[in-house]
Each structure stands twice: as C-alpha cells, then as structure tokens.
Image (cartoon, rainbow, N blue to C red):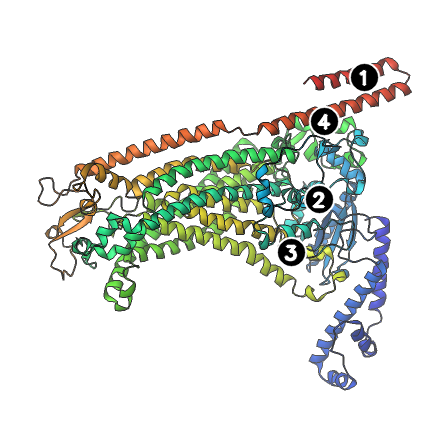
C-alpha cells in the first residue's frame, strides 16, 4: 500500500476506535433519538416507557441492542464517507486519480491456525505485488456492508503497464487511419431501423497500430497516460502479473499465482470492476459508463432487432468475448435463410397433407379399415385395424414429402456457405481488431501455473531464453526485471516438463474414463429402449380398455405415447449425465496437466463435445437408424435380451417419431439452458444482495456491488459455445426429419443473444479480458459436423422416411397409371397366417376371429413356395436406397467443395487493406528511426557510425516502399 493510503487508513481506524469507545447502556439511552433522526425513514424510535420495558425483557433488549449496533455502524461509515468527500460507488482510489484495475477480497478464517497461514500467504503475496510495481489500497472489513470482508484494490501505474505491454506485445495507436472507408452498399438505407448510432458502433477512431515499445514511446499517440491503455487492457496486464506472482515456499515447493490462493481460500475473489451501475451512468465524468451503454443498447430484449455493438463489446470485455458474440450473431443471421426455406417446406407439407394418397388409403374405412394388422407385442396385445393410425399418418406427411429431399440437399449447401462466409467475417474482424499478426504460439510462453507447480522436473527450453534476452536488452524496466527474476521458474533457462511415462499414464487413465462415461450413456440409452419395449404393451392395454381415452385414441396412439414418454425420460437422463460428467471432464483434464491455457481448453473441449455428442444424439440415432430395422416377422421376431421384442415403426414410417424425439430434446435443452443462464444467476444475486438494497449508494461501494455478482469463470464461454454447437448439430444432422428445426433455433438464438448479453452485463462480474482471433477448435468441430450431416441426412431420407419405397413403387410396381400411388399401402404390407404363431406369440384374445394379419415388410405370403422370405421389391428398394445415398453424398460434397473453393477465406479488400496498413506502419516506424538517427548525427561526435545507421534507415524506408 502507498504511504498516503496507509496514513488515511490509520486515520479511519482511529476514528472508528473513538466511536467504539463511547458505547454502553447509558450512552444507548442518550443517543437513541439522535440515531433515529440520522437514519432516513426510521420510525422505530423508543420512548422511555418502552425502554423500561426492554430492561425487564432480556430477549427484546438484545434485539434492540443489535439494531443499535447496526445504526452505529451506519453512522461510522457515513462519517468515513464525509471525511473522504467521495462516493464509494467509484472505480478510483481514495485520491480520485488512480484507477482500480483489480480487486482482491478475503474473509478472516475463524480457525486461528488456518488464518495464520493464510495471513502469511497474503502478506508475502501483497509484498511481492508491491515489489513488482503495483499499488495497493486496503478497505478494512469495518467499511464493508456486512462487516466481514476485506478488499484489496490494485492499481497498475504507467511504469508497470508500459513494461508488460511490451512483454505481451500489445498493439497501440501510432497514427490515425487515413485510408478511404469502403464504399457503402446502396441498399444499406433499408437496414436503417436495425442499425445503432455510429458513436456506439465505433466508440473510438480507427488507427494504425504497432506493438508498444518503451524505447519509442514518443512515437505513439499518448495524450494521457492514465487513459492510454483501456480498462480491459489494464485488467489483462494486472491479471497476468498476479497469476504469476509468488507467495512463498511450502513443502519445499515454490507457490505462486492468484488461482491457487483462491483455491485454498486465502482470497475469496479476484476480479476487475465494472465502470458503473448498469441502469444509470457514473457520476464521475472520467468514467465512460460503457456498461450502461451496453445495457441500454444491447442487453435489453427490446433491442433484439438491432445489430450488436461489437467494437464496444470488444473494448469493454476483450476480443475473446467479442468474437463469440460476433460468431453467434452471424450464425443467427444465417439461420434466418435456413428458417425461411424450412418453413416453406413445412408449409408445402401442410398444404398437400390432404392430397397424400398413402395417408388417404390408411384413413379410408374401405381400405385401411379393412386391413387387420398383427399384434405389436406378444400375448397381451390384440389385432388392430390400420385406420387407427390415421391421424399420425396424416401428420407424418408434414415432414415426409418431396420437400424433405430438397431441404436436406439445401442444408448441406447452407452449412458450407455458413462456414465459408464466417471465415470471411472472421478475417474482417481480425483486421479491424488488430489481430492479424496475433498467433496462438504467443500463448506457449504463458505456461499454466498449475503446470509449473505440479511438474517438478526441469529441462532447458530454447524458447524461454528469448525472454531472458529481452531482459538483457533493457526493454524491461527495473520493476519488470525484479519481478521476472522472482518468477525464474517461468522465465529462466530451465522450465518444468512432464515426463513421457507420466504423460502416457495420465492419457490412458483419461481415455479410459471418457470411454467409461460413453459406455454409461449407451447403457442408459439401452435402458430407455427397454422402457419403450416394456411399457408399450401397458399403453396398448390401457388405451383399448379405458373408455375415457377413446376420444384421444386417434391422436395419442400407443406408439406415440411410448415415444413421447421415452423422449421425456431420455431428456431427464441426458441432463443428469451432463451435470455429472462436466465435473468429471474438468477433473480428468486437470489431472492431465496441460502445458498452456490453449491446450487445456482444447482438451476439455474435445472431451466435453465427444460426451455431449453421444449423450444428446444417441437417442436420435437409434430412432433414425435402428428402430424398426431389425424386427423380424411374426413367426420369427427379434428379441433384446431374449425377452423384449424389438420395436416396430408406425405403418406411416419412423420419421414422425424421430421428429418427436428431436423436438422434445432440442426444445427441452433450449428452455432449460435459458432457465439456467438467466433465472439462476438472477436468483443468486437477488438473494446475495437482499440486505444491501436498502443501503445508500455512497455506502454500497463499487467493489462490494461487483463482489455480490456471480463469477464468469474461465470456462464461461466454453459452455456458451458448447450449447450452440450442440444446437448446430440438431439443425444439421437430423434436419431432414424436422424442417422447422432452423426456425426454432433462430427464435432461440434471438433470445440467446439478449440473455447472454443481459447476464454478462448485469448479473456477472466483469470478466478478465483475453485475446482470441478465432473461435478456436470449435471451427474444426463445426467442419466435421458439416461433413457428417450430409451422410446422416442421406441415410434419413433413404432409410427412415418412406420416400425411396414410394418412388420405387411409383416407377416400377404401380398398377394404376391414372393414380400411380394408389395401392402403395397394400404393397408395403405383407401377409401372415395366424395359425403360424407359436404359443408364446399368439394373442390371448381373438375377438375378430382373424385368420390372416398384415405386417410392415416386403415378404412372400404364407401360400408362396418362398414363404416369409424377402421379395424382389425389397431388394429393389434396398438397391435404390444405397444408390440414392451414394448419389446424394457425391452431389452435395461436390457442390460443397466447389463452393468452398469458389469463396476465398479472406476478402480481397481486406487483403489489400492489410498490406497497405503494414506498409504505412513500417514506413512510419522507419521514418521515426531515420529522424532519430539524423538528430543523433547532429549531436554525436562519432559521425561515421551514426551516418551508417542513417543510411541503413533510409534503405529500410525505400525497401518498405518497394514491397
């Protein structure tokens, strides 16, 4: 802590002690009315009669005494505020000049021994922070709202900021961009209602930038050192320091980093501050109130139709969060086109629903009403008439029609367009946000503190020697040199590493754990299948014997009831497994000890995505590709575990069941996700701040307000990406079965953008700024899902829908040229002689005296010499399905690759601007060096050497112009 802050703190403590000293029963009676007059709105003053009554009533006396203690605390804090003449709702130190870049908080441990250890750690840690050049200011627990929390405010002065800006290669302005702005689209005027004001969309001018260098400080546009680095850059630098600052040696090992101190309870929180309250601007004119602007223009649902202020998001939260919202916004925009086409395909199915010959035959009492179907389960199920499935067959036409094929092909091309155009959008953002030269290899120098602590063995790394050379060149000031020397474990010649044997053992254990959990998912899916097989007979008996269900029997068939309840059960299991596996995935990733933060995120991403992929999509894969495919026939059914008969599809196909499964899982996940993201943080914050709501603003400090918010952890964006990528899988992998999926995703994403922005702006502490030039490994995952979606949709159209069998019948087996599809239902059902049932399969009741029943398959009748074997029509249909899959995949893949080749990843205009900016930046830097050497030539005696440097600088300027 600086000296002035220390003296001021001592004065405050002395004043508090003086106030504490005038207590007692007599003082209580004398000062009670005074306290009541000081507190606004207080109507609980005590008369003399009541006081005498309280003296005789011990319980009520204690109650009023506690209330009086609260009043005294209020008065003490009010006196402190009056002394400072400054509201505590501020982002500055008490002097009102130095900005608070970071805040640490802690509570005293009631266990004396534990508190002694924590106090020693804090003392050493804060001492090292002071030695590194940071400035600290402490808020005593007496000044906190609950009287229990200490707050350490951290300020990074110019020397520290400039030092680590150079170490972290941060780009800063050198000259205002004088390049002509790109030509505006004449149609942009039509988008005026959706646009935000220019001062919000572009909160700061466009500059040419260059990596900061202390040796060339006068080259950069430094108008005010206090505001030259943005608050997000300042908190990023401070976090870089405190995450590597040592705090002592324990058990013979060096300990360092704020994350470890948070884990062991030495500190309770570490966070940068929001610049103001979100619902009103800051009183201090030095605060830009960007949080308020973001809330008013971005985080309210009433602005859902407006574009996002991406530059302001990036300025306030950093590039990593900015790139996420840019991707989410672009994904939502592209969903608009897919949603329109999907809705039109659904509308086509709705309009032509009554024209479907197949569903018409099923519903016809003279056709479907005369067809007796074989029982759907053994013994307890009865024979049933085909027209009982009339309504489900009619509704299946909504999704199983010619438009399904068109939409499946369209989505295969749409995915490619989305990914390619996103690459172009990403390239433009990289240029606009000065991320063109940003490489993730820079993060390789930033080892995870956990890696450095747990890896005790050392080896020489040539890369880290470059950092040591930076120190030797004098590019880092005294504070930086001193701090880097303390952190020699990071920046010295010898670096920690994990032996190959240990790494292999950890990977094997991690892989086995992931396989175990995937096996658990498969086991749960088999359990749901067994549930479907076991309860179907119960639903069939219930609906046949219960008269109250007869009115809905046309809509709610046993198949549909089983499918809906199984889907709901499956969704509950999915949520439970997700909750458990998230913690397991983090644990096994920590156990692998990844070297860098980038490696950690990538490994966790692959584990979580692989698990979520199997967890969410396994039930859909079962319905799409397995249900009804291995049933057998009445005389020889296929059984699971030799007990449960495999499920059959509805006579109209399994596509309607796949649609039901997809709708329940997809919609349920989105609803549950929004509840988790919005309602849970709001409830937690409301509960945590319920006591502080009655405090005046100037007593409820800015650091306390942010302390009461939820923590947006380092994996906060990871879960947001994961949620959207899982949704992306739903609308691509199975979209042929549900054309309305993109529309549901579009509506959800419009809400998602505002929910994410609202919770980030109002319900969470300000995240630590981080750089990112892309969405990372998620791009590769999306590419893989795009390729897989072509295959899955081709199989859905071929094997799950009835399109290929109908086409084969239309062109090869129709018997009525005037109405080619008439007779299709009769053609798709085979005959079975009831007398061929075994005793285990024969229904217990046969009220209709059925001798021949029908079942869904292509087999010869019982009187044929090849009875119950597959007919030639079956093989023709199978050949047509395989041919369709091959043709569709090749056509879509050819179009995808052609479109990907045709659309460049980086727009030509952006390429030209990047080259132009590089040239101008190099020219400015070389001219600066030239002027510097010319000036030195006039002052120095060694003219020959200086003239040589001048000549070299002139050559660099000419070379950059040629390039």
Q: Looking at the picture, does residue 362 appear above or below residue 595? A: below
The residue where tag 3 is placed is 709
Q: Which residue sits at x=32%, y=46%?
A: 400
Residue 298 on image: x %, y % = 62, 50
Classify 10 Å Cα crowding around label 3: few (below 14), some (14-19), many (20 and above). many
- The secondary element bearing badge 1 is classed as helix
Residue 498 on image: x %, y % = 58, 34
- Rounded to the nearest angstrom, the CA distance separating label 1 from label 4 is 20 Å
- The secondary element bearing badge 2 is classed as helix
Classify 10 Å Cα crowding around label 1: few (below 14), some (14-19), many (20 and above). some
- Which callout, 2 or 4, points to the residue nearer the camera? 4
- The secondary element bearing badge 4 is classed as helix
Q: Which residue sits at x=45%, y=42%?
A: 338
Tell which of 923 and 201 is nearer to you.
201
Residue 40 on image: x %, y % = 76, 71
Q: Tell me if label 3 and label 2 are in contact, CB under 8 Å.
A: no
- Rounded to the nearest angstrom, the CA distance separating label 1 from label 3 is 57 Å
The residue where tag 2 is placed is 235
Q: Which residue sits at x=50%, y=51%?
A: 748
Q: Which mark is residue 949?
A: 1
Q: Earlier in the sequence, mark 2 or mark 4?
A: 2
Q: Can you tell which quarter of the image residue 799 is in? A: top left
Q: Which mark is residue 921?
A: 4
Q: Which mark is residue 350?
A: none
- The secondary element bearing badge 3 is classed as loop
Classify 10 Å Cα crowding around label 4: few (below 14), some (14-19), many (20 and above). some
Residue 608 on image: x %, y % = 49, 43
Q: Earlier in the sequence, mark 3 or mark 4?
A: 3
Q: Is residue 10 visible?
A: yes
- Which callout, 1 or 4, points to the residue nearer the camera? 4
């Amino acid at each position: 802590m600086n000296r002035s802050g220390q003296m001021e703190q001592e004065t405050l403590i002395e004043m508090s002690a003086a106030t504490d000293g005038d207590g007692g029963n007599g003082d209580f009676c004398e000062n009670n009315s005074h306290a009541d007059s000081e507190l606004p709105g207080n109507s609980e003053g005590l008369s003399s009669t009541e006081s005498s009554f309280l003296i005789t009533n011990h319980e009520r006396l204690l109650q009023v005494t506690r209330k009086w203690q609260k009043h005294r605390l209020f008065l003490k804090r009010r006196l402190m505020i009056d002394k400072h003449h400054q509201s505590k709702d501020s982002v500055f130190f008490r002097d009102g000049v130095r900005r608070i870049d970071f805040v640490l908080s802690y509570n005293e441990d009631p266990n004396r021994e534990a508190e002694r250890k924590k106090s020693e750690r804090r003392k050493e840690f804060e001492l090292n922070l002071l030695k590194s050049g940071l400035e600290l200011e402490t808020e005593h627990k007496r000044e906190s709202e609950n009287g229990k929390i200490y707050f350490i405010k951290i300020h990074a002065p110019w020397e520290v900021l400039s030092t680590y800006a150079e170490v972290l290669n941060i780009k800063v302005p050198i000259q205002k961009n004088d390049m002509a702005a790109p030509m505006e689209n004449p149609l942009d005027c039509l988008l005026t209602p959706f646009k935000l004001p220019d001062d919000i969309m572009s909160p700061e001018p466009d500059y040419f930038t260059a990596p900061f260098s202390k040796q060339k400080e006068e080259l950069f546009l430094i108008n005010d050192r206090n505001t030259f680095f943005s608050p997000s850059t300042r908190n990023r630098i401070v976090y870089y320091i405190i995450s590597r600052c040592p705090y002592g040696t324990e058990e013979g090992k060096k300990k360092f980093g704020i994350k470890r101190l948070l884990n062991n309870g030495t500190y309770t929180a570490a966070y940068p501050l929001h610049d103001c309250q979100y619902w009103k601007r800051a009183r201090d004119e030095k605060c830009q109130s960007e949080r308020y602007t973001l809330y008013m223009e971005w985080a309210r649902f009433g602005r859902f139709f407006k574009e996002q202020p991406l530059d302001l998001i990036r300025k306030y939260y950093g590039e990593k969060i900015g790139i996420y919202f840019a991707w989410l916004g672009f994904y939502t925009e592209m969903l608009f086109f897919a949603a329109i086409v999907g809705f039109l395909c659904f509308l086509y199915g709705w309009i032509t629903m009554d024209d479907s010959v197949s569903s018409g035959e099923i519903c016809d009492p003279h056709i479907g009403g005369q067809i007796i179907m074989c029982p759907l389960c053994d013994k307890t199920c009865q024979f049933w008439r085909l027209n009982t499935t009339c309504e489900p067959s009619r509704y299946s036409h909504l999704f199983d029609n010619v438009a399904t094929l068109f939409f499946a092909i369209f989505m295969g091309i749409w995915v490619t367009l989305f990914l390619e155009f996103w690459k172009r959008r990403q390239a433009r953002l990289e240029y606009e946000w000065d991320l063109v030269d940003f490489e993730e290899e820079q993060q390789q120098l930033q080892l995870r503190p956990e890696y450095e602590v747990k890896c005790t063995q050392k080896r020489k790394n040539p890369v880290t020697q470059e950092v040591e050379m930076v120190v030797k060149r004098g590019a880092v000031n005294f504070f930086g040199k001193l701090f880097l020397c303390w952190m020699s474990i990071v920046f010295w010649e010898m670096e920690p590493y994990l032996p190959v044997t240990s790494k292999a053992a950890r990977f094997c254990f991690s892989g086995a754990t992931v396989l175990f959990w995937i096996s658990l998912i498969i086991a749960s899916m088999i359990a749901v299948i067994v549930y479907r097989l076991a309860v179907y007979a119960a639903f069939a008996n219930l609906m046949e014997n219960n008269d109250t269900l007869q009115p809905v029997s046309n809509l709610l068939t046993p198949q549909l009831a089983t499918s809906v309840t199984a889907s709901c059960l499956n969704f509950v299991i999915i949520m439970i497994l997700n909750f458990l596996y998230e913690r397991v995935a983090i644990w096994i990733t920590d156990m692998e000890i990844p070297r860098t933060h980038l490696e950690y995120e990538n490994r966790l991403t692959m584990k979580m995505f692989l698990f979520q992929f199997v967890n969410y999509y396994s039930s859909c894969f079962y319905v799409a590709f397995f249900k009804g495919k291995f049933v057998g026939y009445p005389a020889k059914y296929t059984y699971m575990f030799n007990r449960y008969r495999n499920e059959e599809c509805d006579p109209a196909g399994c596509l309607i069941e796949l649609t039901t499964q997809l709708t329940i899982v997809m919609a349920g996940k989105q609803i549950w996700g929004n509840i988790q993201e919005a309602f849970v943080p709001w409830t937690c914050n409301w509960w945590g701040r319920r006591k502080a709501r009655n405090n005046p603003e100037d007593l409820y400090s800015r650091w306390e307000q942010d302390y009461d918010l939820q923590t947006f952890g380092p994996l906060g964006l990871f879960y947001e990406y994961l949620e959207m990528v899982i949704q992306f899988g739903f609308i691509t992998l199975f979209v042929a079965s549900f054309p309305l999926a993109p529309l549901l995703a579009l509506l959800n994403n419009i809400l998602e953008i505002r929910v994410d922005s609202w919770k980030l702006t109002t319900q969470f502490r300000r995240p630590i700024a981080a750089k990112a030039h892309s969405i990372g490994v998620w791009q590769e995952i999306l590419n893989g899902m795009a390729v897989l979606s072509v295959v899955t949709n081709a199989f859905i159209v071929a094997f799950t829908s009835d399109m290929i069998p109908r086409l084969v019948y239309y062109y090869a087996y129709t018997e009525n040229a005037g109405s080619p599809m008439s007779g299709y239902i009769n053609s798709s059902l085979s005959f079975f002689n009831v007398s061929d049932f075994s005793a285990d399969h024969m229904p217990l009741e046969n009220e209709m005296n059925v001798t021949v029943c029908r079942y869904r398959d292509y087999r010869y009748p019982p009187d044929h010499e090849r009875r119950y074997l597959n007919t030639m029509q079956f093989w023709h249909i199978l050949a047509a399905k395989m041919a369709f899959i091959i043709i569709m995949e090749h056509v879509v893949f050819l179009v995808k690759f052609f479109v990907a080749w045709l659309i460049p990843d980086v727009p030509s205009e952006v390429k030209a601007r990047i080259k132009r900016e590089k040239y101008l930046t190099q020219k400015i830097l070389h001219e600066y060096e030239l002027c510097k050497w010319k000036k030195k030539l006039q002052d120095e005696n060694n003219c020959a050497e200086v003239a040589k440097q001048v000549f070299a600088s002139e050559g660099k300027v000419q070379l950059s112009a040629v390039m």
